[in-house]
Amino acid sequence: MAAGAFPTRAARANGAAPEGAVLVALDFGDADRAASRAELEALAASAGARVLAVVEGRRSRPDPALFAGSGKVEELARIRAATGATVVIFNHELSPAQQRNLERAVGCRVVDRTSLILDIFAQRASSHEGKVQVELAQLQHLATRLVRGWTHLERQKGGIGLRGPGETQLETDRRLIARRVKVLRGRLERLERQRTVQRRARARGEVLALSLVGYTNAGKSTLFNALTHAGAYAADRLFATLDTTTRRLYLPAPGAITVADTVGFIHGLPHTLVAAFRATLEETVHADLLLHVVDASSPVRDRQIEEVNRVLQEIGAESIPQLLVWNKIDLNGAAPGIDRDDCGSIARVRLSARTGAGLDALRQALAEAATSKAESRRLTAEAEHTKDAHVT
């Protein structure tokens, strides 16, 4: 269930109680199991769920029918009944058949990781573009699971009492979804064209374009506000930012540069979301420099860096230069400053966006990047002028 799995933001504001949930975090031999469980609990809390119990276990591979083994599913059903939970959340992606079988076995709704993330995005989307992108992702996900709403038709092989409009209804639903998907894609294409015009205008002005990227809750929006005084929404929770915000930043040496705050990434980010948010992520693809914000206090920061780079590769932004920004040093005791590579180029900046420590070092790094880009443009222009002179 992509949307509506949890109380909406409006419902919570009106005093609706959070929905009780049992979490399932199975271990398939992955590293950082504790961090993965903590992330699942944070996702559930972000969706508005109250965690009543966490079921864990080890398996070599998923069960084709139930994902977890039959014994573990029986244990899960007992815990669900004892706690009175109304939803079970798996920290994994389930097939439609697995989800359907699990719901029968445990007696309540079952939500997988993909649906959970989609639900959070649906709650957080506020702009027109964000809502369109989330709805598109939800419909694409729902299209593979339409049969969940028509389990009474599984026996429809013909016969008395079993004939009817079931298949016609499924086909109608699929056609309606396909029609709506086409409309939403058209809207996103128009929004993408508008962004393209804006980017060309910035390019003509030879303005350095920066894009903040990073794992969710790494502090991108806090850093964005610290640099630009934009007042963008920032909170200590997952996916606090969904809509891209762009502001100009003025530095003494290079002058104006643009900084874009973008949606955070996470392990297992649904492909439907990446595809739907492609128009928003175009700001990243066309940036001159990526400020890769890292939570320096996280024990799994290396894994988070790898996950961000994987998504960047998926959207075609892997070749854009990166500057690592180690944020939240106030939580791990590191000193603010700059780390350079063997060539003398700035490779990493250590700072705290919350306290402001190290922001001057970042401004210095940005000034160097802008100066380097201006010099590169000058050399390119001179080379083209020389080439044209030879041709003449």
Image: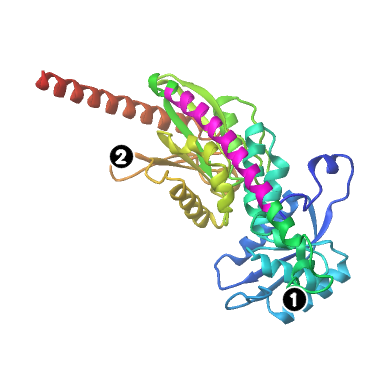
Q: Is the residue under label 2 in contact with that under label 1 (CB below 8 Å)?
A: no
Residue 31 highlighted magenta (yes or no): no
The residue labelled by disc 1 is 73
Q: Quadrant of residue 299?
A: bottom right
**What span is in magenta?**
174-200
Q: What residue lies at 83% left-to-right and 55% top-to-bottom?
A: 19
Q: Is residue 315 left or right of residue 14?
A: left
Residue 261 x/y as whole percent: 55, 34
Q: Is residue 321 left or right of residue 65?
A: left
Residue 208 x/y as whole percent: 41, 27
Q: Is residue 226 left or right of residue 97?
A: left
Task: Reply above or below: 296 against 366.
Answer: below
Report the quarter where the C terminus lies: top left
Neighbourhood count class around disc 1 (C-alpha, 10 Å): few under 14, some 14–19, many 20 upward: some
- Amino acid found under the numbered disc labelled 1: Val
Residue 229 x/y as whole percent: 60, 24
Residue situated in front as seen by the camera: 328 or 266: 266
Residue 186 highlighted magenta (yes or no): yes
Q: Is residue 97 visible?
A: yes
Most common secondary structure along the magenta stretch: helix
In 3D space, how far apart are the residues under numbered discs 1 and 2 (Cα atoms)? 56 Å
The residue labelled by disc 2 is 344
Residue 172 x/y as whole percent: 70, 52
Residue situated in front as seen by the camera: 109 or 185: 185
> Which comes before the other along the chain, label 1 or label 2?
1
Task: Reply above or below: 268 against 365.
Answer: below
Q: What residue lies at 71% left-to-right and 66% top-to-bottom?
A: 99
Q: Is residue 54 visible?
A: no
Neighbourhood count class around disc 2 (C-alpha, 10 Å): few under 14, some 14–19, many 20 upward: few
- Amino acid found under the numbered disc labelled 2: Gly
Q: Is residue 346 left or right of residue 11?
A: left
